[in-house]
């Protein structure tokens, strides 16, 4: 006689997947639970919170103080136009199946079905401009490289993301690396290049590791290599670690570094599109520019061009950082205002104090006063007021910020990071620090208004020389934060406001 088998209760197996960041940094670590009703968000979750979350039945959508309901319904996300970042936070970054299930490789398949000139025309018609800061039309670069003579051509991705307050490139490389790989493969197909390089800043070790793993998997699956998706077309990709110099974010200094030389700026012409890496025609684009291309090819140039305003087409990944309550990434069509970003998304300052100044466009971007917060975020609108959109980095400062000190930092940063090739940048930035120091010290030494006016005149002349005489944007843009601080916050320099009132 045998004993009856003891019934065993069925066991539910749950998979724990580390996906990419959604860009809601103030809620991280953010845990999403997949339920029949969709993905539900809980965060920020600490190890101490986990027992209580299980007690609340969070695997079945249980209520908890850290619960935020459906992730897609969180206002910060729901109000965005996510094209480039559509998959971010949804997929396992290194899963080819996940990538394909969410529309991956559709852009590359479309590109392979077209003639190279037709692919280039799609990028031209989309109005896509370089997202690295210069905003040069991507299609014109590609067309130039396509038409350049030579059997060997290259595609280089500038992933030396060194601007303060910027992290969108890193998010793509770590959270959706196949998107960048696909964009670079499309560029190679379009211009006739068979080799690409991703130049990643040395401070991004995790991004480098993820990219290298993704490239290996893509090659093994036939999405890279000698037979792109079975098309007979060839494109190989390699990662190179940057040299740790800010100036290597400038495309020609980057190319010098890639060739194993000291990263110093090249004189132009010749343009890299004609004589770039190892003297060959080269496409050099930023991560976000290349990561946008698959969407353009998959959905059509007209669909992408419909987003944005004026000559600023498509969307921009905007990065909110500094003294801001809800720091993170916001992808919006051009035309959103700084005021919307600061308060509707950023939630004001983390300190709870009033916002005094906002630097837009990295460490060499202008400080934007409140009187300009309602301008549409648009390359031409910002250029008209002496500001830049740049890479979309926004750093917030409250009313305790000293703009004279921040202006000095810009000059000091340039002096430290200059490649030294041109005099306006190398010497101008050093003299700039000295002039600002004299200006800030003038009241303490009893210098009267006439002496301070003299120093201001000297500073403005110096900035003009740097603006118009520097070989690249390193020296050419350093005056932006200095002049904007001087124009909009003169009291911080010991000067009266032009209208006799406090600066905006």
Image (tube, rainbow, N blue to C red):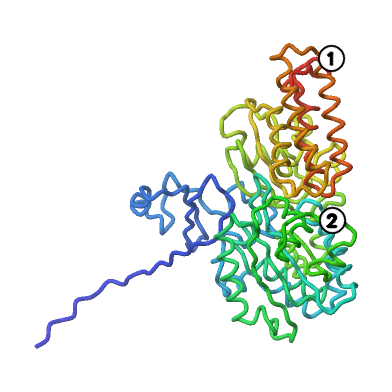
Q: x and y percent of residue 345 in the render?
A: 64, 42
Q: x and y percent of residue 3 in the render?
A: 12, 82
Q: Badge 2 local density, few (<14 within 10 Å), some, or many (20+)?
A: some
Q: Answer with left or right where residue 272 lies relative to residue 160.
A: right
Residue closer to the observer: 305 or 162: 162
Q: Answer with left or right where residue 10 lies relative to residue 156.
A: left
Q: x and y percent of residue 395 in the render?
A: 66, 39
Residue closer to the observer: 397 or 251: 251
Q: Badge 1 local density, few (<14 within 10 Å), some, or many (20+)?
A: few
Res. 270 mark: none
Q: Answer with left or right where residue 104 lies relative to residue 379.
A: left
* Secondary element type, mark 1: helix
Quadrant for residue 463, please give it.
Answer: top right
Residue at the spot of label 2: 136
Q: Residue at x 73, y 36 (%)?
A: 411
Residue at the left extreme of this rendering: 1
Residue closer to the observer: 245 or 122: 245
Residue at the spot of label 1: 450
Task: Using the image, determine if residue 11 lies above or below residue 399.
Answer: below
Q: Residue at x 51, y 47 (%)?
A: 27
Q: Residue at x 60, y 35 (%)?
A: 323
């Amino acid at each position: 006689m045998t004993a009856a088998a003891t019934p065993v209760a069925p066991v539910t197996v749950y998979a724990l997947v580390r996906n990419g960041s959604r860009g809601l940094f103030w809620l991280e670590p953010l845990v999403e639970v997949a339920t029949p009703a969709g993905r539900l968000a809980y965060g920020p979750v600490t190890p101490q919170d986990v027992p209580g979350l299980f007690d609340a039945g969070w695997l079945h959508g249980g209520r908890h103080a850290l619960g935020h309901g459906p992730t897609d319904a969180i206002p910060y996300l729901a109000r965005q136009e996510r094209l480039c970042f559509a998959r971010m936070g949804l997929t396992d970054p290194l899963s080819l199946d996940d990538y394909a299930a969410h529309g991956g490789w559709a852009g590359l398949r479309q590109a392979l079905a077209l003639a190279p000139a037709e692919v280039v025309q799609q990028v031209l018609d989309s109005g896509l401009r370089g997202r690295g800061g210069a905003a040069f039309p991507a299609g014109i670069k590609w067309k130039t490289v396509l038409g350049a003579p030579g059997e060997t051509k290259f595609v280089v991705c500038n992933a030396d993301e060194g601007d303060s307050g910027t992290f969108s490139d890193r998010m793509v490389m770590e959270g959706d690396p196949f998107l960048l790989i696909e964009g670079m493969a499309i560029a190679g197909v379009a211009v006739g290049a068979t080799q690409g390089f991703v130049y990643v800043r040395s401070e991004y070790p995790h991004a480098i590791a993820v990219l290298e793993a993704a490239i290996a998997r893509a090659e093994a699956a036939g999405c890279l290599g000698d037979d792109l998706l079975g098309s007979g077309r060839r494109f190989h990709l390699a990662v190179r670690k940057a040299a740790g110099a800010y100036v290597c974010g400038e495309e020609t200094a980057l190319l010098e570094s890639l060739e194993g030389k000291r990263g110093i700026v090249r004189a132009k012409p010749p343009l890299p599109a004609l004589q770039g890496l190892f003297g060959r025609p080269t496409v050099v684009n930023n991560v976000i520019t290349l990561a946008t291309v698959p969407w353009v090819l998959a959905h059509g140039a007209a669909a992408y061009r419909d987003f944005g305003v004026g000559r600023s087409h498509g969307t921009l990944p905007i990065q909110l950082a500094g003294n801001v309550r809800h720091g993170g990434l916001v992808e919006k069509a051009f035309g959103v205002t700084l005021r919307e970003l600061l308060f509707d998304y950023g939630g004001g300052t983390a300190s709870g104090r009033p916002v005094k100044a906002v630097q837009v466009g990295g460490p060499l971007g202008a400080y934007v006063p409140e009187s300009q917060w309602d301008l549409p975020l648009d390359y031409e609108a910002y250029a008209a007021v002496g500001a830049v959109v740049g890479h979309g980095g926004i750093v917030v400062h409250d009313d305790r910020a000293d703009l004279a000190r921040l202006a000095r930092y810009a000059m000091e940063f340039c002096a430290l990071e200059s490649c030294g090739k041109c005099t306006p940048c190398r010497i101008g930035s050093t003299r700039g620090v000295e002039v600002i120091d004299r200006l800030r010290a003038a009241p303490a030494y009893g210098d009267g208004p006439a002496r301070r006016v003299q120093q201001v005149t000297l500073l403005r002349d110096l900035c003009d020389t740097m603006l118009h005489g520097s070989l690249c944007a390193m020296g050419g843009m350093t005056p932006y934060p200095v002049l904007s601080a001087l124009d909009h916050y003169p009291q911080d320099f010991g000067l009266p406001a032009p209208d006799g009132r406090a600066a905006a």
